[in-house]
Amino acid sequence: MTLEQILQSSFTKTKKAYLLFDLGYTRSQVAELITNGNYGFAHNIWKKWNDLIQLKQQTLQHYLLSFPSTDHLVLNWKLTEHQETD
């Protein structure tokens, strides 16, 4: 979504802020755009948004690290792929 689409949408201020943060806008910019300069409100929304992003990253890392590495399987498959059979 573009800035104009977000601002003209019927989303809540919180949802609009999340989308603007996703687009790379700063807390100051979001405060000016949707809260009439209320930086504290924009900061509180950013903090929750940032916590969600970090939680998603930690969950993904945990998920990826919970699987054993398959590198050795690929290497073994490549080594045995070209072996001659007796």
Image (cartoon, grey):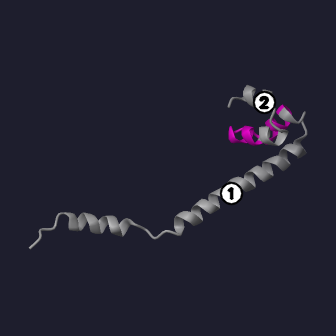
Q: Indicate whether 20 appears above or below 75.
A: above
Q: Where is residue 41 shown, x and y percent of the image?
A: 88, 45
User: Which residue does the image show at 73% across and 39% down from the upper left?
Assistant: 19
**Magenta-span inclusion, residue 38:** no
User: Which residue does the image show at 63% across and 57% down from the upper left?
Assistant: 57
Q: Residues within 10 Å of mark 2 (few under 14, many from 20)?
A: few
The amino acid type, in three-letter code, at marker 1 is Gln
Quarter of the image for residue 9 reads top right
Dot 2 corresponds to which residue? 9
Q: Is residue 16 left or right of residue 60?
A: right
Q: Where is residue 2 shown, x and y percent of the image?
A: 69, 29
User: Which residue does the image show at 58% across and 62% down from the upper left?
Assistant: 61
* Outermost residue, front side: 10
| Label disc, if present, on residue 54 of the rendered structure | 1
Question: How many numbered callouts?
Answer: 2
Main SS of the magenta part reads helix
Q: Secondary structure at mark 1?
A: helix
Quarter of the image for residue 74 reads bottom left
Q: Quadrant of the C terminus?
A: bottom left
Q: Where is residue 77 shown, x and y percent of the image?
A: 27, 66
Magenta segment: 18-33
Real-space Cα separation, disc 1 to disc 2, in angstroms: 27 Å
Q: Where is residue 36 shown, x and y percent of the image?
A: 90, 33
Q: Indicate whether 80 appears above or below 39.
A: below
**Magenta-span inclusion, residue 21:** yes
